[in-house]
Amino acid sequence: MTGETTSKHGILGVRDIDFNLDRFPPAPDLAALVERHWLVSWQLPPGREASVTLLPHPCVNLVLDRGRLAVAGVGRDRFTYVYRGAGRVFGVKFRPGAFLPFLGAPVATITDLTVPAAGLWG
């Protein structure tokens, strides 16, 4: 694949960790709203942690991380994710502006926030 589903732009500061990042294009009927699905997986020895710094993209992600489903709004600054032990994080990256119908409010209301999905949709 080429283009937006394979770019590694925005991933910085990868140190002391071997992780897998897989990106998958959406089904054709979702392509107008969803840019891609993504899956990050890693395995570290017990008691060890590592981090990666990410630059935000101007979009909303629906993220399943450590058994919690959350909506990550558009971020305005880079952020660091800390990996511990073994795990996986799955996400759905919406196209810019495409999350509005699911939120029922301006997307700006969740800028710089990660909100539990249950809090948005009850």
Image: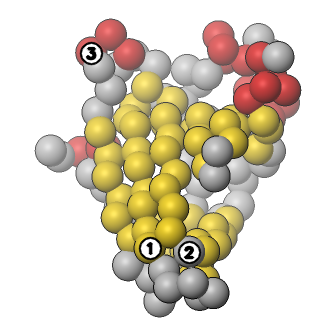
Q: Which numbered disc, 2 or 1, marks the residue that appears first in the sequence?
A: 1
Q: Which numbered disc, 3 or 2, marks the residue that appears first in the sequence?
A: 3
Q: Farthest residue in the left direction?
A: 1
User: Which residue is at 82% across, 17% downward?
Assistant: 122
What residue is pinned by disc 2? 85
User: Which residue is at 32% across, 46% downward?
Assistant: 23
On screen, residue 117 versus residue 16, left or right, reads: right
In the rendered structure, which amino acid carries the disc numbered 3?
Answer: Pro
Check disc 1 and report its element: helix, strand or loop.
strand
What residue is pinned by disc 3? 28
- Tell me the crowding category of disc 2: few under 14, some 14 to 19, or many 20 or more residues within 10 angstroms, Cα based: few
In the rendered structure, which amino acid carries the disc numbered 1?
Answer: Gln
User: Which residue is at 65% across, 10% downward?
Assistant: 101
| Residue 17 position within the rendered picture, expressed as x and y whole percent measured from the top left | 44, 82
- Tell me the crowding category of disc 1: few under 14, some 14 to 19, or many 20 or more residues within 10 angstroms, Cα based: some
What residue is pinned by disc 1? 43
Distance Cα–Cα, label 2 vs label 1? 6 Å
